């Protein structure tokens, strides 16, 4: 299988796409074709790792990692991803809990897969591989945790100063010598722009061997399709119905992974994206104008993205707003609605949910009543509420118990360097804090 650039550069192998992160012409890698599966193909699969191995096999055709796929998927899907009923006497949906990994957000899935692949592809002698990652809060922690202590690989995490929760910040800054944590004076979009600029800077590229671990890396996207494939298969086996999914969306990695699972033939019904006050995607689907803007700060901070990267992929794979509108919907949720939903979910459903998850629940509540009852809906829960304790606890008036993974991380010493939002500042921080 080859991967082409959204902007037309020559297609590359999976291994190159994983290592390079972004195409030479600045585009994003997408599979040249998507495999189509029949449900019977998975009849013998019981676990998510088994589904992952079969589903990912065609993507690994011709890869140096083909013989490692069995081990890679077992390393990746080593924590539970349960789909639990979310009900009251009169309402019924399911919550897909993606937050049982080491840093309590769904980003662990992609980060662990990428680390499992890159650590096998990368020679441990010679110039180390430098992974640059811009984060709105959760990606950086997941990537740092997945690569912490891996020989021959170093990680640079860029996060927006003052715009991540205290517990997220701890997860971004508590790692070993091969992780450099940079607090950038700016927004997530500035961090993302810096990473993109570093990748195409000749001088930096001579000194460092870069790769990316953002959801621009295809290695983040592919493993996220797996939980949609697995969950829809299980749901279909039990109920005979195709569940709809509501996906909290920022950079559109998780939403695109959901679309790809349906494209590959898995029994997913409607796909509905929930965005926060950064409404670009919802506006685009409504009136067809793609208008990237500065991101605004919201309570669902991991979704504060003003220019979602993966839209370039979605358009390259499926066309423009006219086509996309037929396969997807997107609705925006305000900060007030997030707060109300966190309270209501706790009171009605007895669930403490994070602000991102609350956007999906709220969008589900607002679906036309006949749609809510006629179809089955799986609401994607992207992070553990304890990660956003400062938002959630005052609203529900009680403490959210800390999951053990999170408790371990909070005990570690932390270190970070603060920089301005310029390539020059990034370059100096890297020269000071890394081996080239
Ligand atoms: C990253 C993140 C999102 C948004 O996911 P995208 O793939 O960027 O659309 C939603 N919720 C949480 C908790 C996240 O960390």
Image (tube, grey):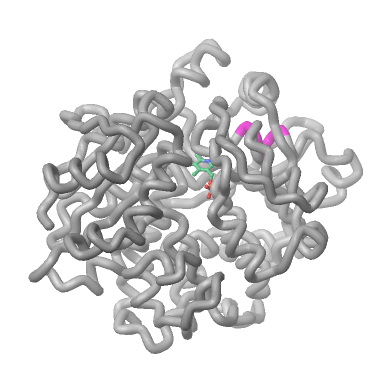
Looking at the image, residue 274 lies above or below residue 214: above
Q: Quadrant of residue 126?
A: bottom left
State the residue at coordinates (45%, 70%): 25
Can see residue 235? yes
Residue 210 figure quarter? bottom left
Q: Is residue 246 left or right of residue 3?
A: right
In the image, residue 18 lies at what x, y percent?
36, 70
Q: Give the tally of numbered discs.
A: 0
Q: 315 above or below 290?
A: below
Outermost residue toward the right in this view: 370
Identity of the residue drawn at 50% across and 59% down: 224
- 351 lies above or below 290: above
Horizontal side of residue 353 vs 177, given as left or right: right
Give whichever of 183, 244 is nearer the camera.
183
| Nearer to the camera, 213 or 230 | 213
Q: Among all residues in the image, which is located at the extreme bottom?
A: 62
Q: Is residue 339 left or right of residue 366?
A: left
Q: Is residue 28 left or right of residue 316?
A: left
Q: Position of residue 251 (x, y in %)?
A: 54, 48
Q: Main secondary structure of the magenta part?
A: helix
The quarter of the rendered structure image containing the C terminus is bottom left
**Is residue 305 one of those drawn in magenta?**
no
Q: Front-most of 237 and 275?
A: 275
Residue at 40% of width from left, 78% of height from top?
14
Q: Residue 45: tell me if it is visible.
A: no
**Residue 26 percent across, percent down from the top left:** 46, 65
Magenta residues, as a range? 358-362
In the image shown, does 23 or 234 lie closer to the viewer?
A: 23
**Residue ID at (15%, 49%):** 178
| Relative image position of residue 102 (x, y in whole percent) | 33, 44
């Amino acid at each position: 299988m080859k991967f082409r650039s959204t902007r037309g550069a020559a297609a590359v192998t999976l291994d190159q796409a994983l290592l390079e992160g972004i195409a030479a012409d600045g585009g994003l890698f997408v599979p040249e074709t998507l495999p189509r599966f029949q449900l019977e193909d998975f009849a013998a699969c019981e676990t998510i790792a088994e589904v992952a191995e079969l589903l990912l096999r065609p993507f690994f055709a011709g890869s140096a990692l083909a013989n490692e796929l069995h081990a890679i998927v077992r390393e990746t899907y080593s924590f539970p991803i349960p789909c639990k009923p979310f009900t009251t006497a009169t309402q019924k949906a399911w919550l897909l809990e993606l937050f049982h990994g080491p840093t309590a957000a769904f980003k662990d899935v992609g980060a662990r897969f990428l680390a499992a692949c890159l650590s096998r592809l990368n020679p441990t002698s010679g110039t180390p591989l430098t992974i640059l990652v811009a984060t709105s809060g959760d990606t950086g922690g997941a990537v740092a945790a997945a690569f912490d202590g891996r020989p021959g690989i170093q990680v640079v995490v860029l996060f927006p100063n003052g715009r991540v929760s205290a517990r997220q910040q701890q997860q971004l800054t508590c790692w070993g010598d091969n992780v450099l944590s940079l607090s950038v004076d700016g927004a997530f979009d500035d961090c993302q722009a810096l990473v993109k600029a570093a990748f195409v800077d000749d001088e930096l590229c001579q000194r460092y061997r870069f790769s990316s671990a953002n959801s621009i890396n295809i290695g983040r996207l592919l493993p996220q399709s797996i939980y949609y494939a697995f969950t829809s298969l299980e749901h279909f086996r039990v109920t005979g119905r195709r569940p709809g999914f509501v996906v909290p969306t920022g950079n559109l990695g998780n939403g695109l992974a959901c679309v790809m699972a349906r494209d590959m033939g898995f029994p997913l019904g409607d796909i509905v994206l929930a965005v926060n006050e950064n409404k670009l995607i919802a506006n685009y689907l409504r009136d067809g104008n793609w208008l990237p803007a500065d991101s605004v700060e919201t309570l669902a901070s991991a979704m504060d993205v003003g220019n979602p990267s993966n839209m370039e992929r979605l358009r390259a794979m499926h066309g423009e707003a006219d086509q996309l509108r037929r396969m997807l919907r997107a609705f925006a949720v305000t900060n007030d609605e997030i707060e109300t939903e966190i309270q209501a979910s706790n009171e009605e459903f007895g669930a403490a949910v994070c602000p991102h998850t609350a956007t999906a629940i709220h969008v589900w509540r607002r679906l036309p009543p006949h749609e809510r009852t006629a179809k089955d809906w799986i609401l994607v829960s992207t992070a553990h509420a304890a990660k956003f304790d400062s938002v959630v606890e005052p609203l529900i008036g009680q403490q959210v118990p800390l999951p053990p993974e999170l408790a371990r991380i909070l005990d570690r010493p932390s270190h970070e360097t603060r920089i301005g939002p310029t390539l020059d500042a990034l370059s100096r921080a890297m020269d000071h804090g890394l081996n080239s």
